[in-house]
Amino acid sequence: MPPSLIKVNGTNSSPNGYAKGCEYALTFGDDGATDKAKVGGKGCNLGLLTQARFPVPPGFTVTTAAYSRFMDLSGLKPKILALMSAINYDNADDVESNSATAREMIMQTPMPMELTSEITSQYADLAAGGSDPFVAVRSSGTAEDLAEASFAGLHDTLLDIRGPEALIDAVRACWASLWSARAVAYRHRNGFLHEDVDLAVVVQRMVAAAAAGVLFTGNPMTAATDEMVINASWGLGEAVVSGLVNPDSFVLKDVGHSLRIRDRTLGDKTHTVRRNPEGKTVDGQGTITEDTPAALQAAFSMTDDQVLKLARLGQRVQEHYGGFPQDIEWALEGSDVFLLQSRPITGVDFSWDADLEEWQMFPEIDGTTWTRSLADENWTGAISPLMYSVRAFSWAQGHECAAGYWGDPALQEKRYWKFHRATAYFNCDLERDVVRNTIPPMLRPGLLANLPVPWREEVQDATFSWFGYAKLYARVETMRPQLYKGFDLQKNKWYGKFSTEGKGIPRKDLPDLSDTALRFYVNRQLDIEDEYTRDMWTWFFINARDMLTLLGLMLHHWYDPEDKTAFQAVLTGTPRASETMKANHMLWEMSQRIHKSKCLTAAFNANQDNAFFEACKEFDDGRAFLEYYQSFLELYGQRGMPDRDIYFKRRWEDPSIDYRSLQAMLKTPDAPDPQVKEHETNAKREAFVDVVTAKMQRATLGLFKVELFKVVLAWCVEFVIVRDDERNFLDHCTLSIRWGFMEIGRRLTQYGVFESDDDVWFLSKQELYRLWDTRTMTPLLRAKIDARRRDFIKMMERTSPLPPYIVDNRAADLDNDASADGSGVFKGIGTAKGEITATARVIRQLKDIGCVREGDILVVNSTDPGWTPVFHIISGLVLETGGILSHGSCLAREYGLPAVQLANAMQHIPDGAIVTVNGDAGTVRLAETNGVETNGVEST
């Protein structure tokens, strides 16, 4: 015996009391107990938790070496592999028959004495001098919880096993489960070789659980990493994990690193799994399932204090695993919480959107309705995390500052923005309050579009304080004059500032700055935008809003209430060209130069994108063209991007942007000068205004109405021009910010921290600066970058439409409340995202699973691992019971199948009916029944 080991309780142990030196059975504290190749996924995680001093019931793992030794000594491996190679995987009976033979061979083969001795010795140590303990015996696969596949639930777990002989049988049963039909089919389908599989077996003291269940430290349905979900029921957690019951459900929210319970849902908990009081084992299990007493069904299985205690423990576990959301099995015994397992959550596309809200000044209020509408209108396209963290902060500051000038703390102290899947949602509740508090009723009708349809009548009719409205204008004009000075601020102050300070230093000089100087420079450029936003917020969102609305009212009441186009007509065409018009004119002139020059035309046709501009350097007309193009870039090189985000290239960086514009223009080379067209449009506008004012003048108080109309119209026309110009000049500053962040990205790539320069766009400014300081890329940060890039690309390519509204991180169909219209829509609980329309296949027993056809929506009470083979052919799932953390729901998310839990689904949905399952909204729509009985439900 090595001198470093001492004898404790008959085992070789280290000074900390953990056993050492065993090859076939390692306690959770052994040095090898965290080697996944030896102990599998479950064993590894239990070793990590134990060695980190988390409350884990003691136990040991029968290693993969024990399984290999068993197979070698018995000679079973070549025989079983021969059975597997003979399987016709298109024939379910063949899979079942051959796999059953393999399992029987294992169960009938005696355990070698050397393995028996080591396993039973470790089992005896669990007794701590007492009688044989009850243990859980769980399979622990070496391929569990892979990113590309999860083997969870495929291999056996046996509970409340007692005695050495029963334990040895249970270990063999776990080994045999490697060759169950579902495990064999799963490996074949996912490309895993049968000869490469290994299995360890975890043996762990059973907790006498009063309640147990599952904790997800990130919400698997909403992918929100600032939410936790607990499913709990009386007795052992098997009732929850297997989907046997509708559990109690708790949703917790992390607000400023402080947990609170946001939602509680009482489950019926109709059954309880507990230890068999007679100590008997049935089908390898020492447990029984019995009806839960009515009083316990009606009571929550956890107190709020227990919920919070468990959640805080879950946070610590998540931190221990590098910040990755965890799927944790737990049990309550007395006042103690025990961890039975922890693994990364699989099948959920986390992107850590909540971490992008670090800059927020105010907490998010539960039940807030968020809408995409303002982003769809004013912040179009995919939004990168970096852009959101600086632009949303700037706009939120602008609103908060402006609401302070308005004298309304209720409007000031609410969150304005929320990031979700590469776009920005804004606060509907705040918008509703802004309309109520700052807009007179007669101005409201055209300003309700950003609110859900059911809200609009109430908001339109809400009482209004004219005194408060006058006070708002008086306060602003006293403290920060806006109404007319806004134009001067824009043109005299901000256009000049953007064109000088906003441009920053030349891009070529950025590499010369030290890291400290570069950070200071980027922050200074951001400060320019922030100051501008604070300066102009009221002018944009109060003054302009009211003046444009007032213009519409004048046209409606003083000109013609039936003319729905009058508003657009008086604002079409402008008395002077905006910067956008000027840029378009210069592009048109360049297209004409190409059209009129044979050399330029030939070069343009022979060279694509940037190559054309390079080719122009070789001949006189080309060099003259490049000189003009350079003057164009000096004015408008900061623009040309497809959307507003700083992720996208500008003209300065990518001349192909203009090549494509010129290519489109050259398809109609005889198109008129856009300036001429604009003059014509403006003349039409002026002629229409003359018609409007002539009619107004003939009415009562006509001269007064005309003069007031002209003042308001002039203000609005000037605003339209200035609003367009603002983006042109602001983009100077935005481009300097882009280039500053690009230089940071370049340096982090050079330091070996980033994989590529464009990683920079997928962290918030706060995350980026911390990374810049440490120069250490953690696995969590890498995962954030990759996940957020995935969402960004989906949004950019429009391949994954996002809901118009979200409430508590879930999609909300607020404009079309189909559940109340009697059209055969059933409201349940969404447990996996997505929507599918297909044939419903109602299956009441597993033996009827052969009725399921490819593309069917499976309607079933609940599922356990035995149903797994059918998941690769179905297109959706409707469960009657189980909750979002049940086996069926988890598998649906892994397979990307929409899923809904709907009570009495098999009664509501006829077999063979066409149904639409919407996992986002939690609804099942009965579309047609194909002549089948509808159980009293009228179909649409």
Image (cartoon, rainbow, N blue to C red):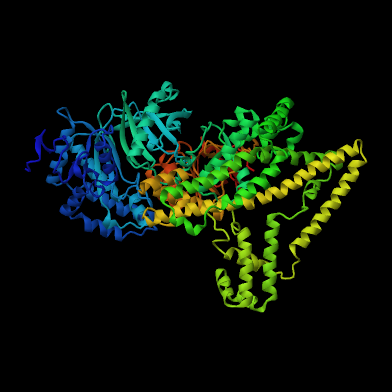
Q: Position of residue 299 (x, y in %)?
A: 43, 23
Q: Residue furthest top?
A: 295
Q: In the rendered view, does 45 fall on the left or right side of 368?
A: left
Can residue 335 be seen from the camera position used here? yes
Please give the name of the residue rendered at 28% of the width and 49% of the height, measured from the top-left corner: 142
Task: Give the percent coordinates (x, y) of residue 593.
Answer: 68, 72
Q: Is residue 780 visible?
A: no
- Between 363 and 771, the residue placed more toward the observer is 771
Q: In the picture, residue 403 is in which quadrant?
A: top right
Q: Is residue 757 above or below residue 297?
A: below
- Indicate the position of residue 275 as horizontal and vertical percent values: 29, 29
Q: Nearer the viewer, residue 682 or 179?
A: 682
In the picture, the quarter occupied by the C terminus is top right
Residue pictured at 67% horizontal, 39% vertical: 541
Q: Position of residue 464 (x, y in %)?
A: 72, 27
Q: Which is nearer the eye, 190 or 704?
A: 704
Instruction: From the viewer's side, name the closer residue of 575 and 364.
Output: 575
- How many callouts does the rendering have? 0
Residue at 33% across, 50% down: 183
Question: Considering the image in quadrants, where does the N terminus appear?
Answer: top left
